[in-house]
Image (cartoon, rainbow, N blue to C red):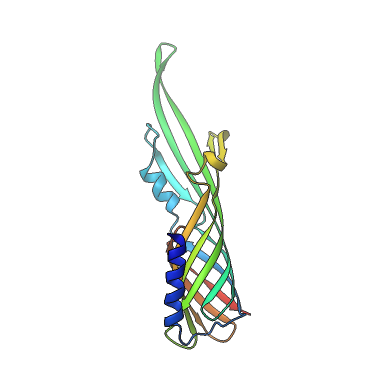
Amino acid sequence: MFKYLIFFLFLFTKFTLSSQISFTSNQLIEPYLGFPNLGRLSAQIIDTNILEKKDQEFSGIGPSGFRYSYMLSDAFSIGIDLMYNTLNEKYRTSQDVYMNNAWTTINKNMLVSTQRLRIHVRMNFHFSAFSDMSDSYLGVGFGTNNKWKKTSENGNVIEKISGSEAVILPFSLRLCYGYRYFFNYNWGIHGEVGLGGPLLSLGLSYKI
């Protein structure tokens, strides 16, 4: 199935390629910031903790990173996409327990820290742009899926998980659409929407 998708994208770009600013042998370096941090949504919705979370707070870095691509032709580029994000969830729990012939309230301050790193091989299929200073593409990426999770209770680490324990699948995929606009030959901005990584990313483009 995957090879048919690649073949279709190749034919699509072959017949729709027109004016653009990126050409064979160009190299593109692109740092970017991604939005939103979906780990926060899953922490709020998918929760097996039977105790109510109080004073819940979130912090961290959305799925952001760095992309590099090399134009093998005017219609096709290959490169890498490094994605990294963090999420810190702080909350408090209270539980009434009966001990020593009396009811006692036990309060716990919890901190769950998560880091995720994905390194993808990327293939981009370039097609018609809106002007000579812009560039559009469809991208396909596949690669690693690394995650580290640490849970602390009242300042003491009570659990650490990583590798196969922390993720459902040991690999990750990405499908996306991107657009770049250059202010001059070298410098521009870019945006990308996709699945498997940031839903939206914005950043700088530097073309060599």
Q: Is residue 82 left or right of residue 4?
A: right
Q: Residue at x 48, y 88 (%)?
A: 132
Please say whether residue 178 is visible from this viewpoint: no
Instruction: Tell me if residue 83 comes above or below residue 91 in the rendering.
Output: below
Q: Is residue 28 left or right of residue 96?
A: right
Task: Classify residue 143 by image quadrant.
Answer: bottom right
**Residue 105 x, y percent position in the rendering:** 41, 24
Instruction: Tell me if residue 87 comes above or below residue 157 in the rendering.
Output: below
The N terminus lies in quadrant: bottom left
Q: Residue at x 43, y 64 (%)?
A: 4
The C terminus lies in quadrant: bottom right
Q: Residue at x 55, y 73 (%)?
A: 77
**Residue 92 x, y percent position in the rendering:** 44, 36
Q: Residue at x 50, y 44 (%)?
A: 167
**Residue 100 x, y percent position in the rendering:** 44, 12
**Residue 104 x, y percent position in the rendering:** 41, 21
Please say whether residue 3 is visible from this viewpoint: yes
Q: Nearer the viewer, residue 167 or 89?
A: 167
